[in-house]
């Protein structure tokens, strides 16, 4: 059985080995970028059906950012939206026969988690300066500094392992079932895998939002909803 | 097959089977609590389900860690090289 932890090399550019996941990633990037360029070129005041659909998607992402981060979505929309769109499309590439999702490989997920790790630092420094960002490590009390330092690394690592484990286990289970049973048996599992793909893309971007907003200095604690009076 | 490989296979199975117990119980409790809250306050269902999804992902990670440990033991075991 092929190990889910290794990746097969397709070809070499110079001395750099290019695996199948990297080629799939390039294809996804090409589709997403050309789609974004095409759609943003034909924006009209009276939207077509396609434009309305994409406006709906952007609107949903905006409202999610507003609800989760309690902030205006402007600076974060590009990063969070791209993360969600990429992971979503990458997880659903299982629909194409012969293509394994690149998120089922270690290196893609490690790169995504590293991006979030860097984004937390970047958004934190951009909104409050270096001192303001560093002060978030002592946020409840200075006693928490070592824990917060360790947490900033381990939460990125846990995001990486979470996405990898979820997507890879789906692919792996389908492979096992396909080798045991016949042609049509793994279809329910594949449907479940598609659902997991959406949920994992959502969770990855929500966690990225939570981590980014926890790195913003001087942010008041999220408002607790008003006590509901008994009717 | 030496005893090291046998131990690895056995521990991989143990890691997954016992590592799944805790997260399964925890996810059950979390979903039950969320259902209870939604039944009490249906208007806050969207907030609760968003928090529930994130919490479930956090809990599920524990089981996924065990799965990754098992796969490391089976496919990338440094002692078997």
Image (cartoon, helix red, strand yellow):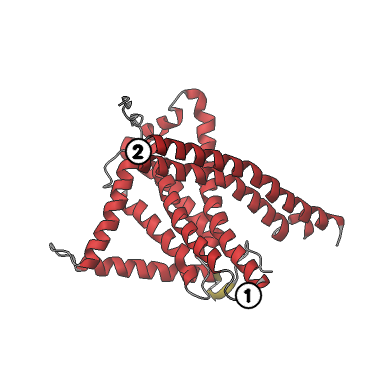
Q: What secondary structure is found at the residue carrying circle 1? A: loop
Q: Is residue A215 visible?
A: no
**Residue A31 image point, x, y percent:** 36, 70
Q: Say above or below: B48 vs A168.
A: above
**Residue corresponding to mark 1:** A182
Pick the front one: A90 or B38: B38
A22 on left or right of B6: left
**Residue A146 image point, x, y percent:** 54, 30
Distance between the Cα atoms at labels 2 and 1?
45 Å
The single residue placed furthest to the right in the displayed view is: B2
Pick the front one: A132 or B36: B36
**Residue corresponding to mark 2:** B44
Pick the front one: A119 or A70: A70
Residues tagged by mark 2 and mark 1 found on one chain of the structure: no
**Residue A209 image point, x, y percent:** 39, 44
Residue A10, located in which quarter of the rendered image?
bottom right
**Residue B22 image point, x, y percent:** 63, 41
Q: Is residue B19 visible?
A: yes
Q: Chain of mark 1?
A: A
């Amino acid at each position: 059985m092929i190990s889910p932890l290794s990746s097969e090399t397709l070809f070499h550019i110079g001395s750099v080995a290019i695996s199948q996941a990297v080629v799939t990633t390039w294809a996804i990037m090409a589709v997403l970028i050309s789609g974004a360029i095409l759609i943003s070129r034909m924006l009209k005041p009276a939207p077509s059906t396609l434009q309305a659909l994409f406006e709906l998607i952007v609107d949903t992402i905006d409202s999610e950012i507003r609800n989760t981060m309690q902030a205006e979505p402007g600076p974060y929309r590009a990063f969070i939206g791209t993360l969600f769109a990429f992971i979503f499309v990458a997880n659903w590439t299982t629909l194409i026969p012969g293509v394994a999702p690149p998120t089922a490989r270690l290196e893609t997920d490690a790169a995504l988690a590293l991006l979030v790790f860097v984004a937390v630092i970047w958004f934190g420094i951009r909104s409050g300066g270096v001192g303001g960002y560093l002060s978030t490590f002592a946020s409840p009390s200075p006693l928490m500094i070592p824990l917060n330092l360790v947490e900033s690394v381990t939460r990125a690592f846990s995001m990486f392992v979470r996405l990898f484990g979820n997507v890879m286990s789906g692919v792996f289970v389908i492979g096992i079932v396909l080798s045991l049973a016949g042609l049509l048996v793994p279809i329910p599992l594949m449907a479940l895998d598609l659902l997991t793909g959406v949920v994992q893309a959502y969770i990855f971007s929500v966690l990225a939002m939570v981590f980014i907003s926890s790195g913003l200095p001087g942010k008041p604690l999220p408002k607790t909803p008003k006590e509901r009076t008994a009717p | 097959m030496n005893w090291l490989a046998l131990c690895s296979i056995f521990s991989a199975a143990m890691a997954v089977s016992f590592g799944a117990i805790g997260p399964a119980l925890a996810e059950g409790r979390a979903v039950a609590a969320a259902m209870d809250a939604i039944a009490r306050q249906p208007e806050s269902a969207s907030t609760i389900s968003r928090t529930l999804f994130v919490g479930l992902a956090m809990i599920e990670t524990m089981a996924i860690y065990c799965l990754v440990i098992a796969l490391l033991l089976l496919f990338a075991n440094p002692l078997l090289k």
